[in-house]
Image (cartoon, rainbow, N blue to C red):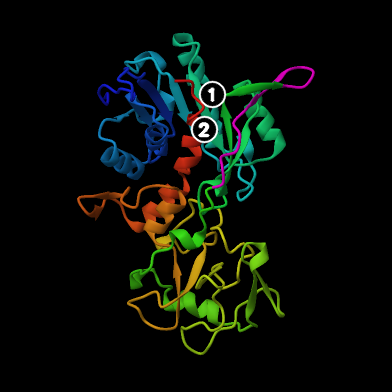
């Protein structure tokens, strides 16, 4: 499973890391290791989603796939982990869900992470860990923090990507003690703002298959409202003359007076302009039927298909979604062909990490 010998610029052999990835998904963590300049000796992934395993196995043939996290035992890995990744399921914690917290059986899998971490600590007391989840209710966050032995850092994904995606990270890679009782906190500073905006990741031309269907477009066209206005001093926010923030459409599929100075407008599935036009909203894993679901941004753009005039209404393409997560454009490809469908790409990315967000955290590992 090793990647071979690695040497620094001075010719000195570099430490190679043994990594255990729990709930590994498409293994954004493996790519983050590479971007952080951390050579990998062994990398084992626990994941049950067959599509995620197919993608990660295609991209990283050296990964050892372990299957269900409940069957993982530290003594059976064949190596002693230096780093543990765990993006444990978020459905019970997310504000977008039912808020079941630990009553959701998927969120209870967090305790498997706790068990495996303890087993690894018995083999390597210095093992590093990086647990990730969504911003959540304080009560649930406190339970996780108590089990992890420290408080999380909230990292802003918008600083390294074109997506507003904040995440909590519990990590001992860099810590500090706070207050009279010396509470331990994950101490990862925010990354520098790379100033990547939605306009930066949009493709110049897209296939007609990403346009809204006639049915979906008819839903948008049922209501006609006034032209929205863009305030450039507030990161491209949109306001309207009346009737809230709805669009006005013409009698066909073209949209008039709707695009901003960058040549596009971001809306919800009903054609309502969203308030922050400079970044994509947090992309979720709820994609279906090619990604046209309630949380997905729609893009209204001039001349987007086959250089046609007028404006088109479309969803984000798989390439654009990869860019939101700072993945390579071809992450889901092998020999020029997609290894999974568009719908699976949307879903798998929604369950993934912003790679550069994790790579930033990993740069604080003492090499």
Residue 103 image position (x, y, % from top left): 61, 36
- Which label's residue is closer to the chain start, 2 or 1? 1
Point 63% across, 31% down: residue: 152
Q: Is residue 161 above or below residue 36?
A: below
Point 49% across, 63% down: residue: 199
Residue tagged by mark 1?
A: 173
Regarding mark 1 in the picture, which secondary structure is present there?
loop
Q: Is residue 191 magenta?
A: yes
91 to the left or right of 17: right
The 10 Å Cα crowd at callout 1, few under 14, some 14 to 19, many 20 or more, is some
Q: Residue 47's quadrant in the figure?
A: top left
Residue 358 image position (x, y, % from top left): 49, 36
Q: Which residues are magenta?
A: 178-193
Q: Residue furthest bottom?
A: 251
193 to the left or right of 47: right
Point 40% across, 74% down: residue: 304
Return the residue nearer the eye: 4 or 353: 4
Residue 87 image position (x, y, % from top left): 49, 35
What whole-number distance in Å separates the C-alpha atoms at marks 2 and 1? 8 Å
Residue 282 image position (x, y, % from top left): 55, 53
Q: Residue 288's quadrant in the figure?
A: bottom left
Point 52% across, 57% down: residue: 197
* Picture quarter with the C terminus: top left
Residue tagged by mark 2?
A: 361
């Amino acid at each position: 499973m090793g990647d071979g010998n690695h040497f620094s610029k001075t010719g000195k052999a570099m430490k190679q890391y043994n990594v255990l990835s729990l709930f590994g998904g498409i293994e954004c963590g493996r790519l983050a290791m590479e971007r952080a300049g951390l050579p990998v000796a062994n990398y084992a992934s626990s994941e049950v989603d067959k599509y995620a395993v197919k993608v990660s196995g295609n991209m990283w043939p050296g990964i050892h796939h372990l299957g269900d996290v409940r069957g993982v035992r530290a003594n059976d890995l064949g190596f002693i982990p230096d780093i543990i990744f765990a993006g444990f399921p978020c459905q019970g914690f997310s504000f977008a869900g039912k808020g079941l917290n630990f009553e959701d059986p998927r969120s209870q899998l967090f305790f498997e992470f706790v068990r495996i971490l303890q087993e690894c600590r018995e083999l390597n007391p210095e093992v590093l860990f990086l647990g990730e989840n969504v911003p959540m209710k304080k009560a649930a966050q406190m339970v996780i923090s108590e089990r992890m032995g420290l408080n999380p850092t909230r990292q802003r994904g918008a600083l390294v990507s074109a997506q507003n995606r904040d995440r909590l990270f519990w990590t001992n890679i860099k810590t500090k003690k706070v207050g009279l009782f010396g509470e331990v906190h994950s101490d990862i500073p925010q990354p520098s703002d790379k100033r990547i905006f939605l306009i930066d990741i949009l493709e110049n031309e897209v296939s007609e298959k990403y346009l809204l269907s006639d049915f979906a477009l008819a839903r948008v066209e049922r209501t006609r409202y006034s032209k929205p206005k863009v305030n450039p001093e507030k990161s491209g926010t949109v306001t309207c003359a009346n009737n809230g923030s709805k669009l006005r459409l013409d009698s066909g599929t073209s949209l008039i007076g709707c695009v901003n100075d960058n040549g596009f407008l971001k809306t919800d599935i009903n054609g309502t302009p969203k308030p922050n036009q400079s970044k994509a909203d947090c992309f979720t894993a709820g994609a279906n039927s090619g990604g046209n679901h309630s949380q997905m941004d729609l893009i209204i753009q001039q001349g987007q298909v086959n250089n046609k005039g007028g404006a088109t209404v479309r969803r984000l393409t798989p390439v654009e979604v990869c860019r939101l997560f700072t993945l390579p454009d071809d992450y889901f490809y092998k020999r020029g062909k997609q290894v999974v469908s568009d719908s699976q790409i949307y879903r798998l990315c929604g369950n993934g990490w912003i790679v550069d967000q994790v790579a930033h955290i990993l740069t604080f590992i003492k090499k």
